[in-house]
Image: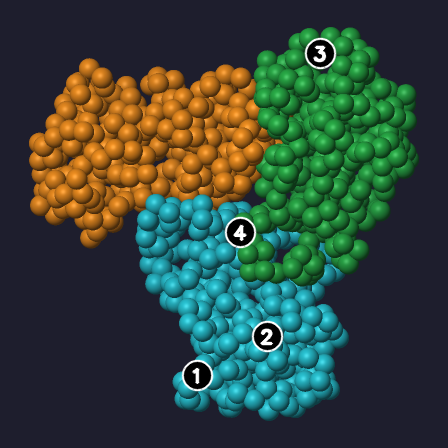
Chain colours: A green, B orange, C cyan
Amino acid sequence: MKDLISVRQLNKEKFFEIYEIFKYYKKRYLNGETKFSDLRGYSIVLPFFENSTRTRTSFELAGKILGADTINISASASSVKKGENLYDTIKTLEAMQFDFIVMRHYMSGASKIVADKVKSHVINAGDGANEHPTQALLDAFTILEKKGSLEGLKIAIIGDILHSRVARSDIFLFKMLGANITLCGPKTLLPRCLSSFDVDNITTDINEALMDKDVVIFLRIQLERQNKVFFSTLNEYSIKYGLNQERINLIRKDGIIMHPGPVNRGVEINSELVYGDRTVILEQVKNGLFTRMAVYRFLLNG
Amino acid sequence: MKDLISVRQLNKEKFFEIYEIFKYYKKRYLNGETKFSDLRGYSIVLPFFENSTRTRTSFELAGKILGADTINISASASSVKKGENLYDTIKTLEAMQFDFIVMRHYMSGASKIVADKVKSHVINAGDGANEHPTQALLDAFTILEKKGSLEGLKIAIIGDILHSRVARSDIFLFKMLGANITLCGPKTLLPRCLSSFDVDNITTDINEALMDKDVVIFLRIQLERQNKVFFSTLNEYSIKYGLNQERINLIRKDGIIMHPGPVNRGVEINSELVYGDRTVILEQVKNGLFTRMAVYRFLLNG
Amino acid sequence: MKDLISVRQLNKEKFFEIYEIFKYYKKRYLNGETKFSDLRGYSIVLPFFENSTRTRTSFELAGKILGADTINISASASSVKKGENLYDTIKTLEAMQFDFIVMRHYMSGASKIVADKVKSHVINAGDGANEHPTQALLDAFTILEKKGSLEGLKIAIIGDILHSRVARSDIFLFKMLGANITLCGPKTLLPRCLSSFDVDNITTDINEALMDKDVVIFLRIQLERQNKVFFSTLNEYSIKYGLNQERINLIRKDGIIMHPGPVNRGVEINSELVYGDRTVILEQVKNGLFTRMAVYRFLLNG
């Protein structure tokens, strides 16, 4: 495996191989070994054609901790403004001898298109509404740490399923790992039928969705990626689909609450619950660092 | 001391402890030891919610020289645009395992609010019109190098006192170190009474302010932070409060002239005097580097 | 030699000295030695007052591979917005102890003006329509690798000669190395007479320009730097001066085709020819990395 473009590239063997590397780095780092030389002499470039703080920072820090040289390219400062096409940008970065190209692009399929054309390792850090594989990996690892396995686990994903690359990557990966998945959201933000996603249940009823779940994932309302009105107001969305104290009781007593961040406080999750004892949102961020370290190393191993 | 938010956290003992580290690094660096490993394995993130070149660059270079990994987050490229709140941004950076958070924010008190909530060391690189503690430290160190002590030293601060975080931090620190302080500027930019700042003299008369001073600090006119008209024109300001050759003679013969930069040439200081033999403006910049190295190390020592 | 501002600073001896260092780094790097410590303890700042991806990235990566600390300053985030003048910006960077200042500026002569005033090494990464010396060096090195020598080589430069810093640097350097140079483009984009540039031929006829050439360099149409209409439409330019399959046959059978990038596909070069077997565009990018490594080292050697 040269690239990580989609979680569909992963079977259980590969997934657990990455998980082992993740655990290795996490354990060592938290024991005080905060600098490695595994990627010394390797270079990482991060062309981000959409704004991002957390994903870019997480990938960049993960690279630096492993000893790599990292260089950012933001859309606003880049030759994109000169009208250079994506393929030429990536071929140029390959010619500059970058070992890793970590890219985010507003177009679904963008990273796949370029990955096949260059020798550099390409990591998809989000492509349009398509996939965000390292987010799915860090979500899965966080669940594994809490629950031991995803086999038979009841997981609900709440929100804008249609426009969410996180939802797509999560669904593919969690199903491969044996989870039972319920999707929930306003009708306009849900797939029309079960067959369009390989899930177990689709509902517009938040109470039904939360009931007896081991894991509930609230998605961020991505106002910036919607060009139609899919629901009337944020306030109405919150009332119908937001997490509040009452609804938390529907989830299993040992169930965990996740969110890819940043949370729209008071929309997806009531403000006082964001860092409550049931949420693992900051644990997801923390695991994101070690997940990216593991992905670099996994791709390097070939 | 986990954080450096305000110079009011410093007593003389702590101040001189930082000064010793400053002298240690400066001496070694200027003797050719330009790379250290004191911060190897530590990571620094620099979320700057206001534009800055010199302060951000100084902090970033100081970190790199000490061997730390550094990552920039500029307001324009960040999740701020997604409407994430400051607290969540900082909690996320803590979860990413950053050891130091060097932040600048347009809101007074911003860094204090978050410092108490995270385990990372937080350094205030400027918060609204409140404080800029490393600027005050580098100013004090520059004065110490030239004058040996601040005890009894006559210092004038000229300009927009009310909106200046540099003025506030300088005043608190210099008074603690025993200096005699005169504030001077247009009435609209001065505190109304002596009691609002613990200073020795407040005047609108530039000649009185300069007379017989050991140190004169000209503040930058921060047009970008003023939302009212506090003086008629820049030209009038320059005529009334700008430094020219005639006024320089009012200052003590061995008196020094300082400015936090960047100078509005011809406004605060006449253009031909900016790098004259009385000014120590570039020495301040140079000392800024070693000051930030010292602050990292001081906070790490606990 | 403290600075690299213009290729006119180079005689053959200096040029070939840089070429030797270039070959040394390229050979070692491609043999797997991808990290050096030649610039360990040195710091590089890259103030770019014009947007750039490839040049900035190439200089930054070259510095990191050699072990230097690098810091970016983009025009948009910088004190330029505060109205600081260029001289003060550069003096400040010198005071921060930067060893190298790699600068791009929209004003011709900008880097020369500041280089004489600071002790730091200044490298001109493009100044207005004046010069881009490292581009000329990497072009010359690419030609040398393919042709062994520039002595007597027939080289054509096609496009906007008047506004191109690449053309100017290429012409000066290639003539010094003994090449025979033809310039070609629309009349409005050509110098009026041979005497204004020391070249061998000036023509508006693309067929005459390509005929029997060893090297043909297509320049990027820099729409962003033109404030008048120099040709009617991009389509007409392409028809009259763009490279197509038919025109490629006019060039010598072993002739090579170059472009500084990014290519406006379908304007200067037909899309399907961009990475054809006659073009060395990506080889130029690759050599750019080793060229910048060599320039750092060359200036350090003094």
Image quadrant where residue A287 sits: top right
Tag of residue C191: 1
Mark 1 residue type: Pro
Disc 3: host chain:
A
Callout 4 environment at 10 Å: few (<14), some (14 to 19), or many (20+)?
some
Determine the chain carrying the residue at label 1: C
Local packing at callout 1 (Cα closer than 10 Å; few below 14, some 14-19, many 20+) is some
Chain of the residue displaying label 4: A
In the image, what residue occupies the spot 48% across and 73% down? C164
**Residues tagged 3 and 2 counted as in contact (Cβ below 8 A):** no
Please tell me whether mark 3 sits on a helix, a strand or a loop: helix
Q: Earlier in the sequence, mark 2 or mark 1?
A: 1
Name the residue type under label 3: Arg
Q: Which residue is mark 3?
A: A247
Task: Give the Cα separation between the discs numbered 4 and 3.
Answer: 44 Å
The residue tagged with tag 2: helix, strand or loop? helix
Q: Which mark is residue A77?
A: 4
Residue pointed to by mark 2: C235
> Horizontal placement of C85 versus C232: left or right?
left
Q: Looking at the image, is C241 positioned above or below residue C222?
A: below
Element at badge 1?
Answer: loop
Determine the residue positioned at 66% across, 52% down.
Answer: C35
Query: What amino acid is labelled 2 in the image?
Result: Asn
Q: Residue at x 15, y 29 (%)?
A: B187
Q: Nearer the viewer, residue B34 or B268?
A: B268
